[in-house]
Amino acid sequence: MTTNAVQRITPAAAIPAPATQTTAVEQARAVAEVAAAVQVAQQNPRDMNRAWAEMRSACDRTGLAGRAFYSVRNRGTGPSVHLARELARIWGNMDYGVHELHRDDDRGMSEIRAYAWDQQTNVRSSRTFQVPHAKMAGGARKPLTDLQDVYLNNQNIGARAVRESILAALPADFVEEAKDRCRQTIERGDGKPLVDRITDMVAAFAGIGVRVPQIEDRLERKRGQWTAADVADLSVVFQSIRRGELAVDEEFPPRVTAEEIAAQASARPGPAPEQFSAGPVDDAAGWGDAEVAQPGSAGQ
């Protein structure tokens, strides 16, 4: 008699490689740095009154207010990374940054982590995401192969994530008042009359190929009706174009005149003349002379 025994083999758990002395030292150093940062922050708490006063003073200056907002077509406007970093500096006891965790050139993908950490209250906001090595151009995705282009693309997207992390870690009312004061500073200008600021804005847009009629189309009002809020909005758009966040043609499409429309209509070919041919006569055309039997007649 033969007995077949089945023996279950359980694979041994993988044993991690022992950490080297250098790795152990780095791990201990990282833990010590975190503990020291928390201890120092708690021993030297932020002065809330000073932070609010410094925020108001900074937002009242045109140097910060002029870079405080971004504008992206189809995605609206919001506080820029410049404003977020300045608010983090003023608030104090905050650490923030962006790390590239992994890059796969074969797949064309990088893994990025952005974070903001309030060391005094131990509030941390972080996000980890994947960034394709590509950018949108002409409505289509264009792959990036140059190492410098990939690095800049990762840093650009990482900076946006850092901005969101910082704004999430800061008090909401602190951020909202900063935005309001920056907007008021832009509308107020640098002490110049509104007419002079409009003239300067028109000259700045002329330098990038945007004409007054295009600006009027965007604002839906003539130049003489522009307000301080309109100038503030145009200032945000202009700075976004300079930073490459907006394209001129997308924000200010070329204006088509009546003469151009008439020229296009005259150049358009007219309809082809109708062709007639002596084809077979439709059967229905001869029904007037045909003898058609009616129901109930003698032929039925």
Image: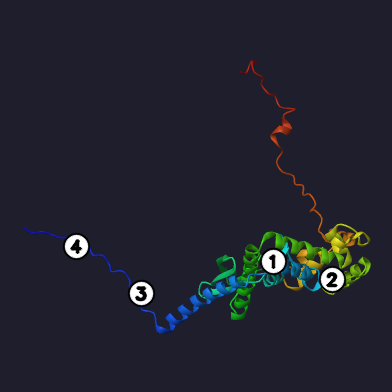
Q: How far apart are marks 2 and 4 (CA)?
A: 80 Å
Q: Which of marks 1 and 2 is in front?
A: 1
Q: Residue at x 72, y 29 (%)?
A: 287
Q: Distance between the residues labelled 1 and 2?
A: 41 Å
Which amino acid type is marked by label 2?
A: Phe
Query: Which residue is the site of mark 2?
Result: 205
Residues tagged 3 and 1 counted as in contact (Cβ below 8 A): no
Is there any visible trace of residue 263 in the rendered image?
Answer: no
Q: Establish if 90 lies above or below 274.
A: below
Which scheme is used to colour this image of the protein?
A: rainbow
Is there any visible trace of residue 20 in the rendered image?
Answer: yes
- What kind of element bears circle 4? loop
Query: Which residue is the site of mark 4?
Result: 7
User: Which badge, 2 or 3, comes first in the chain's sequence?
Assistant: 3
Which amino acid type is marked by label 1?
A: Met
Q: Distance between the residues labelled 3 and 1?
A: 47 Å
Query: Which residue is the site of mark 1?
Result: 48
Residues tagged 3 and 4 counted as in contact (Cβ below 8 A): no
Residues packed near mark 1 inside 10 Å, few (<14), some (14 to 19) or many (20 plus): few
Quadrant housing the C terminus = top right
Instruction: Give left or right: position of 71 versus 203.
Output: left
Return the residue found at the far front. Answer: 43
Question: Residue 182 shows which numbered tag?
Answer: none
Which amino acid type is marked by label 3?
A: Pro
Instruction: Give left or right: position of 24 versus 169.
Output: left
Residues tagged 2 and 3 counted as in contact (Cβ below 8 A): no
